Amino acid sequence: MKLHSVLLGITLTMLMALHASTIDTLFPGIPDIRSEFAVGTGAGQLSMSAFVYAFAAVQLVYGPLSDRFGRRSVLLWSMSVFTLGAAMAVVADSFETLVASRIIQGIGAGAAPAVARAVVRDIYGPERSGQVFSYIMAAFGIVAVANPIAGGVLTDWFGWRAIFVYMAAYGAIVVVLVWYRLVETLPARDPEERGRRRLLPNYGVLFTDRRFVAITVSTCCIHAAMFGWLSGSILVFIDSYGATPSLAGTLISVSLGGFILGSMVAGRISNRVGSLRLIGAGHLICLASAALALVPAHAGVPSAPFTVLPVIVFMFGVGFVIPPGSAAAIAPFPSMAGAASSFLGFSQITASSTVILISGYLYDGTMRPVALTMTVLAALGLSVFFAWMRRQPAR
């Protein structure tokens, strides 16, 4: 494999994994942030949700901008802003300053996954993009597995501020990779077609496409359920189970191993099975495993293995839903892949950030709210997807 192809894969993976690296790495540090700034659990989650809401909102802008001005220039600008926000967080002297720096990080990070998905669509087209997404997401999963462990170790050894040093370094590396190795992939630039006058009409096309809406809503539910687990379980592991941040991060990483395996399997069989069947199977797996997680949670079993095992299966199902779902939602819109990718990312992250914020207020020291949230969201995602599938003509 040529060096350029390898570096392109690394660049796309780091862009797709940026929000996970910025969210998952910080989870083990949240209890220490709460303690240092003397804020409650619900307020403490603002250090997470402020980033995620900003990250979600700006995706609506970055995608269409990349359709007009090109992928590369938008990524270079946005990733520089992200790196600046991370550096500001390192020296934050108040909780308000920390939240402000997280908002700046979110504004910068929003372009990364939205534009990266559009780049994949530009290069590989609708036929191969599903398979490529699955492979990229498998690599993304490896990064995601490492993030909670890295965040826990950094918190244990150096304190929570070291996490933001890591984020700043991550952003700087991505800027260098995009500058030197990512060529412009936008096929043609037509300001009249992709200008501001087309922004609302383009989104209007997406909102009236039942396939896009159904896949977006159903994947949002699974994405939000996953983040409900990530944000809620870390607090239980540290506050109630007495785990250190590094051990809690390791437990989270073990659960994410299921996502890696699921994405790899989805990548291998997607061409034979088809994206829609994969998504449906993933929804079923997620609902069954989330319901299974309710048993030890409601029995009050304070055991990490009983808590994590069903979630590994849940994450396997997520690997069947998110990568193929992203490809299936964007594939019908080659002329506005950036806009479609932006709205998909906006929807997923907005749903997830809302669940993160709510989880702080539902927190009762047990896994019950976490497991119940996952089950309800998995059931809703399954219902939406199969309701749409039943309306499709028989083949």
Image (tube, grey):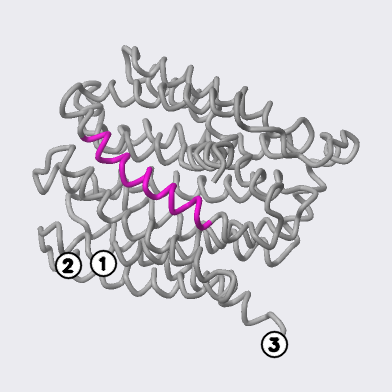
Image marks 2 and 1: residues in contact by CB distance under 8 Å: yes
Residue matched to label 1: 310
Q: Which mark is residue 190?
A: none
* 249 vs 138, nearest the viewer: 138
Image marks 2 and 3: residues in contact by CB distance under 8 Å: no
Disc 3 and disc 1: Cα gap in Å?
A: 34 Å
Q: Is residue 85 left or right of residue 250?
A: right
- Label 2: which secondary element: helix
Q: Nearer the viewer, mark 2 or mark 1?
A: 1
Residue matched to label 3: 394
Q: Residue 168, position in %: x, y?
A: 41, 22
Q: Quadrant of the C terminus?
A: bottom right
Q: Is residue 75 left or right of residue 354?
A: right
- Magenta-drawn segment: 134-152
* 289 vs 372, nearest the viewer: 289
Q: Does the magenta run of residues contain 142?
A: yes
Q: Is residue 205 left or right of residue 250?
A: right
In this rendering, the answer to whether 240 lies above or below 276 is above
Q: Residue 128, position in %: x, y?
A: 64, 60
